[in-house]
């Protein structure tokens, strides 16, 4: 089992591309459940921080 997780700061353009045209979208995933130990696979979450005018993206992948 391999577990990968991270947080990235992306430009609005990069995050918009990842989220299919909406930088504040809940993200894209081929499969995921919750953060409490269930399987994550190719999960991407991006959100726009209005205070810092930055986009934060969290990605996680769990492969069995």
Image: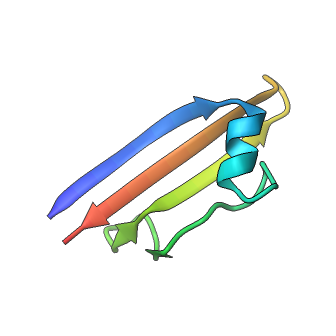
Q: Tell me how many marks there are.
A: 0
Question: Could you say which quadrant of the image residue 38 lies in?
Answer: bottom left
In the image, residue 50 sits, relative to residue 15, either above or below, namely above
Question: Could you say which quadrant of the image residue 56 lies in?
Answer: top right
| Residue for point 64% across, 32% down | 10
Q: Left of 6 or right of it: where is 17?
A: right
Q: Left of 29 or right of it: where is 42?
A: left
**Colouring scheme, one of rainbow, by chain, secondary structure, one colour:** rainbow
Question: Could you say which quadrant of the image residue 36 lies in?
Answer: bottom left
| Residue for point 36% across, 47% down | 5
Q: Left of 42 or right of it: where is 18?
A: right
In the image, residue 45 sits, relative to residue 58, either above or below, namely below
Measured as percent of width and height from the top left, residue 4 is found at 30, 50
Measured as percent of width and height from the top left, residue 29 is found at 53, 69
Image quarter in which the N terminus is found: bottom left
Task: Report the residue that reaches farthest toward the right.
Answer: 50
| Residue for point 29% across, 63% down | 62
Measured as percent of width and height from the top left, residue 53 is found at 82, 26
Image quarter in which the C terminus is found: bottom left
| Residue for point 59% across, 42% down | 57
Measured as percent of width and height from the top left, residue 55 is found at 71, 35
Between 49 and 28, the one nearer to me in the picture? 28
């Amino acid at each position: 089992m391999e577990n990968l997780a991270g947080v990235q700061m992306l430009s609005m353009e990069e995050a918009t591309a990842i989220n299919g045209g909406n930088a504040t979208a809940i993200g894209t995933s081929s499969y995921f459940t919750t953060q409490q130990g269930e399987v994550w696979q190719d999960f991407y979450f991006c959100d726009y921080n209005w205070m810092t005018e930055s986009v934060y993206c969290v990605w996680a992948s769990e492969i069995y």
